[in-house]
Image: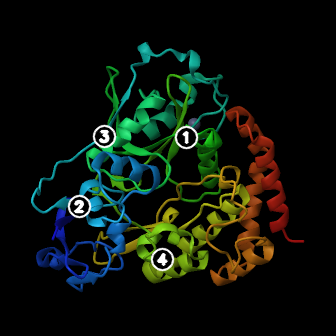
């Protein structure tokens, strides 16, 4: 029977063992007794040393990649989808969050990093790189069209650590091999879309400051049906930031051939180490197949109440506002995997909060079957939610109804800018997107 050692932020936390009847996770007594240790999952407290489960514990099962990444991994490693322990051992040494899975016998703690090369500025042919009037990080006007590869120097400095943004040395044909290589290095990024994590190695003479695996990079899907998703994602992330919601830092880059790539800074990596993250599929034991769509926003509210304790209210407020935003932008892919809790223990108390928002996309324009307005039901509905549904949700959240009107009011201030951004970014579905937003705003406004 196979066994794994589980590390949290590079400390041995315990062991996971496959048994005849299921799986046992045992905390290392010294780890469990240590003052500032974090649990492996919010659902597996340190007060109980042994946690048994018939199937692989959801916190571990949720680390295994899905979709395209899983397909590539399986082809490369010849593993079955149902061999969860095999996949965990093969793919999940380094994950989103602080958990590391090591094979018991090869208890090596090699730190692996995906490296993405940046082309030296003097070698870049800028002809194929689209030029914008707005900064691709903050979406505020640039002094000149296409200036500094479409970035304000201060925005580039904040996101990439250098005043000039990198030009990544990738090509469409190498995406798959990079992902394959990364999986071979046992780094797992869950999610269906192709994406990978890495740091940016600048080949320029002035080397910039780099953290290992600081970014998640999502090239625009090659499939024609998903074109411009990377560009749309940056716009939606910006709309979230504009509503002053805690949102993962992000930007848009172009490859030398003009191909767009969405890039986001990982919020689970800090100078101090890895930050514990758990998504709601792991917390709610919904890591199997389509379970991530089976549930409601109200369940997330309950999850926040349960785990964030006295800090629940501001987190519920953020969740409420992003739910309004998701409705307005046509994001019906807001399933349990796309919401996470982060936790730290700076003192005696475990501090849990909602993770910054990520994966904000107008799925309505990409998924033909997406007739639904939300992946997780709102006030018992997935369609025709309307103002009544959002008022009811506010009540459930114990928020005043003015929370809805204030969010809409703040969104109104963006309305004039959205068509200008859509134009500048060259988004093909700009009219449909503007139309959707205006229609849905009408539905949410007080009659
Ligand atoms: Zn900027």
**Residue under pointer 1:** 221
**Residue under pointer 4:** 311
Residue 2 visible in the shown view: yes
> Which of pointers 2 and 3 lies earlier in the amino acid sequence?
2
Look at the numbered disc 2 and give the secondary structure of its residue.
strand
Distance CA(mark 2)–CA(mark 4): 31 Å
Q: Residues within 10 Å of mark 4 (few under 14, many from 20)?
A: some
Q: Position of residue 355 (x, y in %)?
A: 47, 63
> Which of pointers 1 and 4 lies earlier in the amino acid sequence?
1
Taking the spot 54% from the left edge, 17% from the top edge, the residue there is 126
Look at the numbered disc 4 and give the secondary structure of its residue.
helix
Is there CB contact under 8 Å for labels 2 and 4?
A: no
Distance CA(mark 2)–CA(mark 3): 18 Å
Taking the spot 67% from the left edge, 28% from the top edge, the residue there is 133
Placement of 391 over or under 146, stated as above or below? below
Q: Residues within 10 Å of mark 1 (few under 14, many from 20)?
A: some
For ligand 1, the image quadrant comes to top right
* Quarter where residue 438 is shown: bottom right
Distance CA(mark 2)–CA(mark 1): 30 Å
Is there CB contact under 8 Å for labels 1 and 4?
A: no
Q: Position of residue 33 (x, y in %)?
A: 16, 79
Looking at the rendered image, the quarter that the N terminus falls into is bottom left
> Which of pointers 4 and 3 lies earlier in the amino acid sequence?
3
> Could you say which disc has been placed on residue 393 in the image?
none
Taking the spot 56% from the left edge, 69% from the top edge, the residue there is 293
> Which of pointers 2 and 1 lies earlier in the amino acid sequence?
2
């Amino acid at each position: 029977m196979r066994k794994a050692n589980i590390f949290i932020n590079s400390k041995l936390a315990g062991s996971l063992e496959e048994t005849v009847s299921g799986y046992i996770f045992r905390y290392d007594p010294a780890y469990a007794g240590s003052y500032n240790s974090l649990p492996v999952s919010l659902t597996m407290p340190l007060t109980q040393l042994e946690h048994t489960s018939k199937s692989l514990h959801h916190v571990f099962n949720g680390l295994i990649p899905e979709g395209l990444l899983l397909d590539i991994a399986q082809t490369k490693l010849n593993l079955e989808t149902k061999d969860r322990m095999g996949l965990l051992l093969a793919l999940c040494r380094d994950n989103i969050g602080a958990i590391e899975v090591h094979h018991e016998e090869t208890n090596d703690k090699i730190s692996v990093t995906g490296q993405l090369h940046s082309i030296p500025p003097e070698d870049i042919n800028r002809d194929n790189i689209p030029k914008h009037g707005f900064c691709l990080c903050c979406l505020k006007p640039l002094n000149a069209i296409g200036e500094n590869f479409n970035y304000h120097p201060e925005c580039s400095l904040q996101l990439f650590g250098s005043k000039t943004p990198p030009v990544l040395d990738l090509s469409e044909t190498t995406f798959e091999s990079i992902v394959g290589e990364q999986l071979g290095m046992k780094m797992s990024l869950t999610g269906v879309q192709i994406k990978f994590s890495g740091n940016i190695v600048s080949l320029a003479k002035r080397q910039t400051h780099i953290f290992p695996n600081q970014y998640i990079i999502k090239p625009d899907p090659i499939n024609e049906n998903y074109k411009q998703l990377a560009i749309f994602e940056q716009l939606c992330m910006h709309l979230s930031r504009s509503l002053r919601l805690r949102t993962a830092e992000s930007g848009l880059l172009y490859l030398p051939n003009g191909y767009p790539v969405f890039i986001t800074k990982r919020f689970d990596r800090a100078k101090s180490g890895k930050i514990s993250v758990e998504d709601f599929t792991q917390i709610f034991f919904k890591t199997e197949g389509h379970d991530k769509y089976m549930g409601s926003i109200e369940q997330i509210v309950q999850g926040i109440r349960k785990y964030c304790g006295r800090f629940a209210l501001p987190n519920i407020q953020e969740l409420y506002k992003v739910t309004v935003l998701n409705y307005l932008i046509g994001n019906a892919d807001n399933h349990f995997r796309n919401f996470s809790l982060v936790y730290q223990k700076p003192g005696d108390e475990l501090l849990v909060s909602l993770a910054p928002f990520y994966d904000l996309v107008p799925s309505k324009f990409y998924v033909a079957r997406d007739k639904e307005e939300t992946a997780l039901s709102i006030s018992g509905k997935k369609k025709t939610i309307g103002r009544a549904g959002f008022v009811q949700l506010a009540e459930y959240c114990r928020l005043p109804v003015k929370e809805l009107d204030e969010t809409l009011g703040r969104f109104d201030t963006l309305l004039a800018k959205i068509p200008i951004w859509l134009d500048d970014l060259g988004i093909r579905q700009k009219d449909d997107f503007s139309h959707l937003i205006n229609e849905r705003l009408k539905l949410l406004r007080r009659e």
